Image: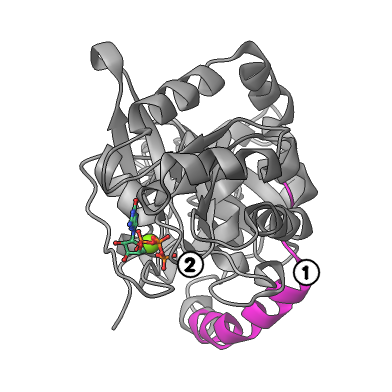
Amino acid sequence: MESNFVDYVKIYCRSGKGGRGSMHLHRAKYQPNGGPDGGDGGRGGHIFLRANHNYWTLLHLRYERHAFAGHGGNGGKSLLHGKDGEDLYIDVPCGTVAYDAETGKYICDVTEDGQTVMLLKGGRGGKGNWHFRSATNQAPRYAQPGEPMQELMVILELKLLADVGLVGQPNAGKSTLLSALSSARPKIAGYPFTTLEPSLGIVPYREGKSFVMADIPGIIEGAAEGRGLGLRFLRHIERNSLLLFMVPAETDDIRAEYEGLLHELEQFNPALLQKHRILAITKSDLLDDELQELLRPTLPDDLPVLYISAVSGSGLQELKDTLWRELNSESNKLQAISEGGSLIHRDREAAQLQHDFTDWQADWEEDDKNNEADDIFEYDLEDLED
Ligand SMILES: Nc1nc2c(ncn2[C@@H]2O[C@H](COP(=O)(O)OP(=O)(O)OP(=O)(O)O)[C@@H](O)[C@H]2O)c(=O)[nH]1
Ligand SMILES: [Mg+2]
């Protein structure tokens, strides 16, 4: 089955080239040397990345291998200005990050609906010969070519923007909790790896307030090295400001399981350990009160720990109160501001890029062949400086 959750695409982008300036000389019946009247070329189209809250994934771009902006039109006689090339907007969900596919370098990200960032600038149009008339040369027979187009292989990667990320082994009850607290309906079942792709839910809180919770696939030992569903989804919790760890009540050694999860996160990105954490002991309906008290002293004591049951509903209000309090604590907000940059701006691993590189190379070459034909004039960039 093909997944609808697409959080990674690669697109070959090309801005438009600038239109050529015209070198037309005006001729009319009684004006044999009417002078230069060649107009300027239009500018080539830009390529923009734009956040659009109507999209939740990059699915709509899955088969979009190319993004070409329009070329600028050539200038014409009678000072006719060439038409500007059409700009192109790549619409993406909020939380999309763009990387240069060749170097892995971070380019930009868009987070707010409508936020627009230029990925590639269109070439400027060349000036027509009219600009070059002078006392010594009243009929210049040259004009500028337009600036060339620019190209870029871009990787777009979605990082979900949720306030709370659920972290737990498969079967911990993450999806059950999300469906108990929000109107999201992720699949729930009594076997590991029920959840194969992240989903988001909006959790209503008191007085019309709400926060966003992300259910991601279960994390197992070795996830950071790619075991299970691994690495691929861990990046989605890089942007959550709060992590809710979940360990089922029937686990033999709750503390060890919690520490194992911490370890996987640390392997993936040590900065994740800076985030505020809460531990929920799930399925607590399986333990009576007495047993819960008995277990207390063995639980980790450096973070808030709560017993919850998504099935009976016990502890859920207290959980929401705690999540809300932590989300709004001053230290959490300050931290979000100070570290926000370093987490999301990490460049991508060169090794992975190399692997990715080969499958689009063929495409790109093919494309080049098709487009060479109309690039016949030469550019002199120095001429183009304003
Ligand atoms: N008794 C009890 N069972 C629960 C509770 N929450 C979840 N379960 C059961 O635990 C099993 C796993 O629940 P899921 O919510 O699918 O677990 P998950 O963490 O999303 O699992 P993966 O998606 O595989 O990572 C299901 O059979 C649920 O019915 C609870 O509070 N009490
Ligand atoms: Mg699940």
Ligand 1 image position (quadrant): bottom left
Q: Label 2 amino acid?
A: Pro
Q: Secondary structure at mark 2?
A: loop
* Residue found at x 75% / y 52%: 269
Quarter location, residue 271: top right
In terms of depth relative to the viewer, which is nearer, 62 or 230? Answer: 230
**Disc 2 packing (10 Å; few <14; some 14–19; many ≥20):** many
**Disc 1 packing (10 Å; few <14; some 14–19; many ≥20):** some
Quarter location, residue 264: bottom right
Q: Is residue 179 left or right of residue 233?
A: left
Q: Is residue 377 left or right of residue 96?
A: right
- How far from the left and from the top, in percent, is residue 384? 68, 42
Q: Which residues are magenta?
A: 345-367
- Is 3 rendered above or below residue 308? below
Q: Secondary structure at mark 1?
A: helix
The N terminus lies in which quarter of the figure?
A: bottom left
